[in-house]
């Protein structure tokens, strides 16, 4: 993991503006769970890919993730991430846009250093999927959200990057491409479960541990799985969906809706959906060759079941 | 050229939000001179690269160019480009950021389809150079601009993309990598001359033909070569540089400064700098193998000498 950090921060051969480098350092030192890099390294061990290339891919994916967060937070006007001020809370929109672009470019440069054109192609497609998902969310706020629509949204937001983290390992030099499809499905299911858990934690987690304010999705006008399931069970409150999306709720309204959802069966139903995808991820692992890396991935799946931050 | 257009617009295999696709169509139909794609195709013929890959690279480079313009116009608050309303003049900042990101991703995807990792790496480096240049301009507005600083800025803004347009051809499948360095230098000199001409035309061109208002660089607080040379000759007006950069000039001031620069010898001195780089580009061509493609590139150089829009 230390090598991945070093790879992300490496300035060798670059002579870029100190403010850009400082912004990058600031973003990288905010840390985070680094679950995607861990996934890349374990999948690469499983697929027998070159270690050097797998460290590069892990750094590339974490950079791509960071870049999308920078633009996301700007667009959403989010002021905190993981308890730290976002870039847009401190800088002008222009500087924030450019920093995100710069990190995209660094991510693409890292990806190109893996030496795999198949990986590069998948990397670009993943960025298109992520951006298309954000655009769809931005353009289609008022449309009636279904469970399928929710799955598509969290696929673009989270699972697509988990997918390439696992699948990409098989595309690296030395990687066993026969494992590509199983690793891809494993990454997909893990990513979907991870995001559902994230959406549940927005209702059940400790704001201090999460590093974001209580009920932050509702505040942002976001309908996630717990809210969706609550609304399905409470058809009488049918205009609530629109009021959330149009941010028409007062602070008191938000806290009331928040408490209603948290105390409803929607939390357990959402957890069941997450568990379903974690079960599927475990089944996917079963189709992959037994190895210490596979055992470590199984532990990763298990740890997500009990995620609380 | 028609095949390049088709490559840029191709939706095969993509199922993305109609608004994104519409925005992309709108941007591509605005046209422009398409000088970069022409440069790619001719350099590819010269380097004997695969035609299919060269069309893909030309599309990738024009897409990358388009993406940087989208974010540029947003950051500068520009409302017109080539006589058409910019995306940010019609859309929210968030939608504009995402559209730019989407076009970056499409450009990277096209680049990966050339099948050349050397090209992909150079492509990512070029994006880093462009973004770093924009960031430097944004963060360092108040610093004293020198001729060297101006060259670095227009390298990032324009010549880096001309460079990869020519150099990239030699990195494509079938391309003669022995020509890489000469093509790179040729692209560099052509790009520098092109941008100097652009900056001169902002003073001497017909606003209708250019599709932008008169004195648009001065209005944006931009010091370009004609202004830089004028200031060197008029040391008495030393605070003028800061007043331009801080946008402290009234409309009358702008028109007066504009007329002073246009009627000064700074225009001819700037033209001499452009001619110098066009001469160098011709010399670079002299080191490349004689062919119809080389003759066509020589014509391209010649046409830039008489550019008036």
Image (tube, coloured by chain):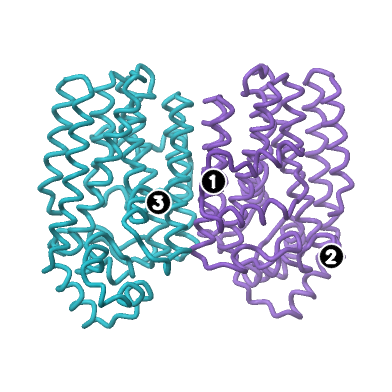
Chain colours: A cyan, B purple
From the top left corner, tell me how far across and down residue B57 is, in percent.
Answer: 64, 33
Q: Which residue is mark 2?
A: B208
- Marked residue chain, label 2: B
B183 left or right of B20? Answer: right
The quadrant in which residue A84 appears is: bottom left
Q: Which residue is mark 1?
A: B104
Q: Depth check: A161 or A209 in front? A: A161
Q: Which residue is mark 3?
A: A68
Q: CA distance from mark 2 to mark 3?
A: 39 Å
- Marked residue chain, label 1: B
Mark 2 or 1, closer to the camera: 1
Mark 3 packing: few (<14 Cα in 10 Å), some, or many (20+)?
many
A3 left or right of B182? Answer: left
From the top left corner, tell me how far across and down residue B52 is, in percent.
Answer: 68, 26
Q: Secondary structure at mark 2?
A: helix
Instruction: From this view, report whether residue B283 is shown above or below residue B220.
Output: above
């Amino acid at each position: 993991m230390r090598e991945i950090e070093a790879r992300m921060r490496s300035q060798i051969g670059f002579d870029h503006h100190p403010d850009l480098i400082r912004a990058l350092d600031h973003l990288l030192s905010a840390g985070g769970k680094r679950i995607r890099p861990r996934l890349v390294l374990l999948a690469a061990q499983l697929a027998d890919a070159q270690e050097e290339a797998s460290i590069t891919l892990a750094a590339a994916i974490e950079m791509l993730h960071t870049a999308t967060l920078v633009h996301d937070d700007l667009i959403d006007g989010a002021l905190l991430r993981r308890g730290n001020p976002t870039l847009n809370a401190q800088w002008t929109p222009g500087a924030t846009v450019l920093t995100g672009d710069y990190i995209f470019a660094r991510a693409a440069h890292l990806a190109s250093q893996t030496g795999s054109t198949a990986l590069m192609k998948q990397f670009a497609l993943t960025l298109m999927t992520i951006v298309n998902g954000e655009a769809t969310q931005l353009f289609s706020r008022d449309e009636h959200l279904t469970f399928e629509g929710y799955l598509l949204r969290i696929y673009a937001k989270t699972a697509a990057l988990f997918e390439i983290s696992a699948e990409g390992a098989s595309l690296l030099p030395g990687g066993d491409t026969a494992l590509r499809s199983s690793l891809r499905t494993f990454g997909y299911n893990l990513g979907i479960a991870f995001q559902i858990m994230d959406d549940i934690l927005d209702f059940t987690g400790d704001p201090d541990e999460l590093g974001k304010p209580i009920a932050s999705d509702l505040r942002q006008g976001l309908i996630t799985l717990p809210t969706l399931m609550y609304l399905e069970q409470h058809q009488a409150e049918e205009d609530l969906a629109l009021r959330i999306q149009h941010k028409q709720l007062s602070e008191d309204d938000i806290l009331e809706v928040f408490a209603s959802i948290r105390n409803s069966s929607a939390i357990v139903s959402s957890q069941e959906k997450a568990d379903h995808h974690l079960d599927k991820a475990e089944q996917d692992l079963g189709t992959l060759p037994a190895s210490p890396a596979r055992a470590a991935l199984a532990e990763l799946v298990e740890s997500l079941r009990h995620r609380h931050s």
